[in-house]
Amino acid sequence: MSLIKKNLRNIYPIFYNKLFSQIIKKFNFKKPLRVLIFHSIKDTEKFNRLIKALKRNWHIITPNEFFHLLDNNIEVSKPSLLITFDDGFKNNLKILSILDNYSISALFFICPGLVELESKNLLFPLFSKKQFRLKSNYEEIKLLNWDDLRFIQSKGHSIGNHSSFHYQVNRLLIKELQEDVNLSKNLLLKNLEFNKSFDSFSYPFGGVNHINLSSLKYLSKTFKYVFSGIRGNNNCSRSKIIFRDAVSLDDKIEITESLMKGCFDIYYIIKSIKLIF
């Protein structure tokens, strides 16, 4: 990101907060129903501070509560938020106590094929290093194994599908995507306790450029809930995809709050309008 873009990204959200917050309240726009994406959590203190700050203004809901809202097209009466994690990094275990302290139930999207390799100690030597040309520091990319995921379930969290091997889905033939999804579904059912969240899928990468109509059509028929990485409000949304907000633990809370209030939503809606409706 260039210095100019970075400065604009940091300045505009704060400006948006000051200028538009009162206007939004005055015209009684839909309350936000947002979904946050986290990946690897390297700094648990920053994560704790962010969750503590968000709890002041947001009602953090469980995955099942979120699915219930979508299933019944229920409009939330107060700003509501679902917490999700993508990729299944091992260091996600470190934040379970934080989630527990705040009585938060989160949704972890994992790649069952990679988990299977991780559980058999084959992921790094036989797949990751060759496929992604990674350096030898395995700890940074170490993933959860099946025992870890069973423990996460026992703590009241949910597990969702993130494809078998984290391929860029829009580059796969539909037959290849079907094979990947079938494998991921079978591995989840074989190794974990069934949960409603098994019917949810989050796009690897998840941006507008990583989603195409053919994959979305197939995934929408195969899964009830298809999560993206595109920003937006899910409150009574008619979209085929579920919007999510990626946030940085290094951002000021004012910037994160502004992003979640929708300061960049119109930009993403314009970019993805063919996929949304």
Image: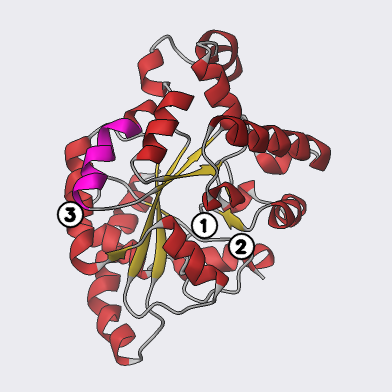
Mark before the other along the chain sequence, 1 or 2: 1
Dot 2 amino acid type: Ser
Mark 1 to mark 2 CA distance (whole Å): 8 Å
Q: Residues within 10 Å of mark 3 (few under 14, many from 20)?
A: few
Give the magenta part as a residue range: 92-102
Q: Which residue is mark 2?
A: 272
Residue situated furthest right in the rendering: 175
- Using the rendered image of the protein, determine whether residue 166 is visible from the camera's viewpoint: no
- Is 99 inside the magenta-drawn segment? yes
Mark before the other along the chain sequence, 3 or 2: 3
Dot 3 amino acid type: Lys
Q: Mark number for residue 52?
A: 3
Q: Which residue is mark 1?
A: 230
- Using the rendered image of the protein, determine whether residue 14 is visible from the camera's viewpoint: yes
Q: Residues within 10 Å of mark 1 (few under 14, many from 20)?
A: many
- Is 271 inside the magenta-drawn segment? no
Mark 3 to mark 2 CA distance (whole Å): 32 Å
Left or right relative to 228: residue 7: left
In-front residue for pair 96/143: 96
Left or right relative to 235: residue 131: right
Q: Residues within 10 Å of mark 2 (few under 14, many from 20)?
A: some
Give the structural element (helix, strand or loop) at label 2: loop
